[in-house]
Image (cartoon, rainbow, N blue to C red):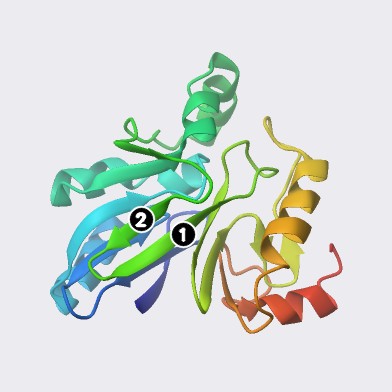
């Protein structure tokens, strides 16, 4: 699997273009803005974007979904619990304060353990609630796209509506730290660095 990391949007989201070298099919993970930059990177490599995957529904991670979908026709993918949560009036009114557009409705709802096939490559959905009810990580050995669940040297906030420190801690300890220690961690923001490993975070992350 080929991985391109781009820093996009007003909140410096780590957006990923993951692609199958054999077929040219690709998925964009967390398109948080700067859609022209994302499209240019895809076009340079001759990629066909078939999925737009959101690790969670916060506006800084989904605000590029609509223009990217219009440009590519790709399917938007999100966990069912976040689709439900971010359609509530509480969530919509709170996160509207950020002034960023919402995502269009998801085309594909996923659950824990689902497989997302990108050409001949596969991402496994790991449900990791805590930052949001439907937060997910995406695993394809030796890589894990951890969204805002786990950062390099940090973890996601839980003080927003829908957050839970208990659930986040459980998600990290039971779902992520059980992955092989050499697994690459590709976070949703580069607060402590743009890449880490599960082993490094297990040893030195002060929030774990």
Q: Which residue corresponds to the image point at 59% horizontal and 69% vertical from the top-left?
A: 190
Q: Residues within 10 Å of mark 1 (few under 14, many from 20)?
A: some
Of 74 and 34, nearer the camera is 74
Left or right placement of residue 3 versus residue 208 in this view: left
Q: Which residue corresponds to the image point at 40% horizontal and 33% vertical from the top-left?
A: 102
Of 110 and 158, nearer the camera is 110
Q: Give the quadrant of residue 207.
A: bottom right
Relative image position of residue 146 (x, y in whole percent):
57, 62
Left or right placement of residue 88 versus residue 48 in this view: right
Number of numbered discs overlaid on the protein picture: 2
* Dot 1 and dot 2 residues touching (CB under 8 Å): yes
Relative image position of residue 66 (x, y in whole percent):
27, 40
Q: Is residue 69 visible?
A: yes
Which numbered dot is residue 116?
2
Whether 6 is drawn above or below 31: the answer is: below
Q: What residue occupies the far bottom of the structure in this picture? A: 182
Left or right placement of residue 173 versus residue 147 in this view: right
Whether 52 is drawn above or below 1: the answer is: above
Whether 155 is drawn above or below 59: the answer is: below
Q: Which residue corresponds to the image point at 63% horizontal and 79% vertical from the top-left?
A: 196
**Which residue is under mark 1?**
124
Relative image position of residue 12 (x, y in whole percent):
51, 61
């Amino acid at each position: 699997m080929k991985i391109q990391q781009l820093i996009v949007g007003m909140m410096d989201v780590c957006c990923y273009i993951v692609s199958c070298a054999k077929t040219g099919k690709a998925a964009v993970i967390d398109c948080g803005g700067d859609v022209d930059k994302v499209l240019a990177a895809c076009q340079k490599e001759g990629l066909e974007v078939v999925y737009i995957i959101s690790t969670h529904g916060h506006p800084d991670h989904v605000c590029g979904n609509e223009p990217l979908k219009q440009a590519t026709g790709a399917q938007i993918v999100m966990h069912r619990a976040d689709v439900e949560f971010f359609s509530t009036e509480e969530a919509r009114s709170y996160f509207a304060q950020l002034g960023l557009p919402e995502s269009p409705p998801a085309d594909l709802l996923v659950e824990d353990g689902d497989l997302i096939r990108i050409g001949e490559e596969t991402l496994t959905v790991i449900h990791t609630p805590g930052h949001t009810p439907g937060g997910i990580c995406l695993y394809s050995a030796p890589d894990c796209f951890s969204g805002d669940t786990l950062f390099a040297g940090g973890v996601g906030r839980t003080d927003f509506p829908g957050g839970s420190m208990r659930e986040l801690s459980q998600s990290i300890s039971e779902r992520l730290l059980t992955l092989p220690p050499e697994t690459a961690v590709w976070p949703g923001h580069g607060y402590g660095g743009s890449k880490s490993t599960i082993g490094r975070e297990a040893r030195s992350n002060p929030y774990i």
